[in-house]
């Protein structure tokens, strides 16, 4: 079992990233060889502010370590520092089909009405993501639901390449998605929209950097409905905001939705919201404290990332060589 996953260093870690990916990465460190990286090349597919990107990279590295990614056990690195990602992505551009990429919902969402004005990189983004995964022959890719389609595309690219060039080189990976709300944490302002760093409303997401007061304020103002909480899960069906908050509570405390409802059935949000704030603060406060420590030592962060990049580069090199060989470009 080999685990590979990445995160774009754009903005602060939010609760969706944490529950959907990062805290699951942390748990997988005990079970498998893990490579986790900052997808800083992917960050170039939308508008770039170089100074901001530079500082986001360190900030995201600090946030991952503070959340429990242990550089002694996992390989933590920057995509940019392992040029094999970009090289393999180019090779795979010859394998991926226009029709496949045309079906990617993330491109449709991110380009919106501005398809013609989007960068070419935003369109071919999933091919670089496939290279990230296939370079290390990953078996498991822990991601949120929104990345599932990209991992499935990676499987298609792997199988087509192996067939076209008659090799057994790439391992088709499995998307590894959390259960329940963890797979898709929703906005606090709209239970039908994903919690996301691109939502214009700050109140829609909880950040790792939020103070306890701000967490409590965001939960207090979270959209809800006037009904009390139901006794069983089916009672949440047409209540997306209630379902999201109950799901977040369960994901944070490790309880099932049934267990949470067992405790709160019949109570209104006036009682539930303070309990949810407390649970979130208990999770996030210690991580935020650790983040402050790691931030204070940028030289150590750079050293960790450099060491990780070196290990990743040597793990990926044989795959890149074999891909060049397969297509007839041996050195
Ligand atoms: P990114 O940076 O948008 O998000 C990082 C991780 O957080 C998950 N996530 C969520 N999970 C549940 N609920 C949410 N509301 C939510 N929002 C974000 C994402 O699913 C992701 O797992 N393309 C990727 C980065 C990437 C990558 C890779 C991932 C590049 N190469 C190779 C895996 C393997 C992305 O932009 O994630």
Image (cartoon, rainbow, N blue to C red):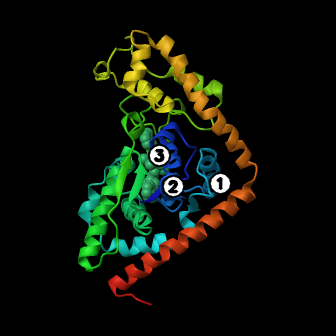
The tag earlier along the polypeptide, 1 or 3, is 3
Q: Can you say which quadrant of the picture contains the N terminus?
A: bottom left
Mark yes or no: residue 99 visible.
yes
Q: Which mark is residue 156?
A: none
Task: Kindly identify which residue carries mark 3.
Answer: 21
Q: In this rendered view, identify the residue nearer to me: 193 or 181.
A: 181
Q: Position of residue 187 (x, y in %)?
A: 44, 32
Label 3, secondary structure: give it: helix
Mark earlier in primary sequence (2, 1): 2
**Residue under the point 45% across and 75% down:** 87
> Which residue is rendered at x = 46% and y = 78% of the image?
318
**Does the residue tagged 3 have its C-beta within 8 Å of any atom of ligand 1?**
yes
Q: Name the residue carrying label 1.
A: 58
Badge 2 element: loop
Residue at the far front: name it: 31
Q: Position of residue 202 (x, y in %)?
A: 54, 33
Circles 2 and 3: CB atoms closer than 8 Å: no
Q: Disc 2 vs disc 1: which is toward the camera?
A: 1
What is the x, y in percent for residue 321?
A: 43, 81
Tell us which disc is closer to us: 1 or 3. 3
Q: Residues within 10 Å of mark 3 (few under 14, many from 20)?
A: many
**Would you place residue 42 above or below residue 18 in this image?**
below
Quick check: 48 above or below 222?
below
Which residue is drawn at the image coordinates 48% and 72% (left, top)? 316
User: Of marks 2 and 3, which one's residue comes earlier in the chain?
Assistant: 3
Cα distance in 3D space between marks 2 and 3: 24 Å
Q: Dot 1: what SS?
A: helix
Rounded to the nearest angstrom, the CA distance separating label 1 from label 3 is 19 Å
| Residue furthest out toward the bottom | 331
Q: What residue did someone put label 2 on?
A: 47
Q: Nearer the viewer, mark 2 or mark 3?
A: 3
Residue lying at 52% horizontally and 52% vertically, measured from the top left: 29
């Amino acid at each position: 079992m080999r685990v590979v996953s990445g995160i774009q260093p754009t903005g602060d870690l939010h609760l969706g990233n944490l529950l959907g990916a990062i805290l699951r990465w942390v748990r997988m460190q005990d079970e498998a060889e893990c490579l986790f990286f900052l997808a800083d090349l992917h960050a170039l597919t939308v508008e770039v502010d170089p100074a901001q990107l530079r500082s986001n990279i360190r900030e995201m590295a600090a946030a991952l370590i503070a959340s429990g990614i242990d550089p002694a056990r996992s390989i933590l690195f920057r995509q940019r520092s392992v040029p094999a990602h970009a090289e393999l992505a180019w090779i795979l551009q010859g394998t991926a089909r226009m029709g496949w990429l045309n079906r990617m919902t993330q491109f449709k969402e991110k380009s919106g009405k501005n398809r013609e004005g989007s960068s070419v990189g935003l369109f071919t983004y999933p091919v670089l993501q496939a290279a990230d995964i296939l370079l290390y022959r990953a078996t498991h890719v822990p991601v949120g639901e929104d990345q599932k389609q990209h991992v499935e595309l990676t499987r298609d690219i792997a199988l087509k390449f192996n067939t076209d060039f008659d090799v057994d080189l790439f391992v088709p990976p499995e998307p590894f998605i959390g259960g329940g709300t963890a797979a898709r944490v929703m906005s606090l302002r709209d239970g039908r929209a994903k919690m996301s760093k691109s939502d214009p409303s700050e109140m829609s997401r909880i950040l790792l950097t939020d103070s306890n007061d701000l967490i409590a304020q965001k939960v207090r103002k979270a959209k809800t409905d006037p009904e009390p909480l139901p006794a069983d899960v089916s009672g949440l069906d047409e209540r997306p905001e209630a379902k999201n908050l109950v799901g977040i509570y369960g994901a944070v405390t490790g309880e099932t939705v049934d267990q949470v409802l067992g405790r709160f059935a019949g109570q209104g949000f006036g009682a539930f919201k303070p309990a949810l704030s407390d649970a979130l603060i208990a999770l996030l406060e210690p991580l935020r404290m650790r983040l402050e420590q790691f931030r204070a030592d940028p030289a150590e962060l750079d050293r960790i990332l450099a060491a990780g990049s070196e290990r990743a580069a040597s793990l990926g090199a044989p795959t890149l060589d074999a891909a060049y060989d397969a297509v007839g470009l041996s050195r």
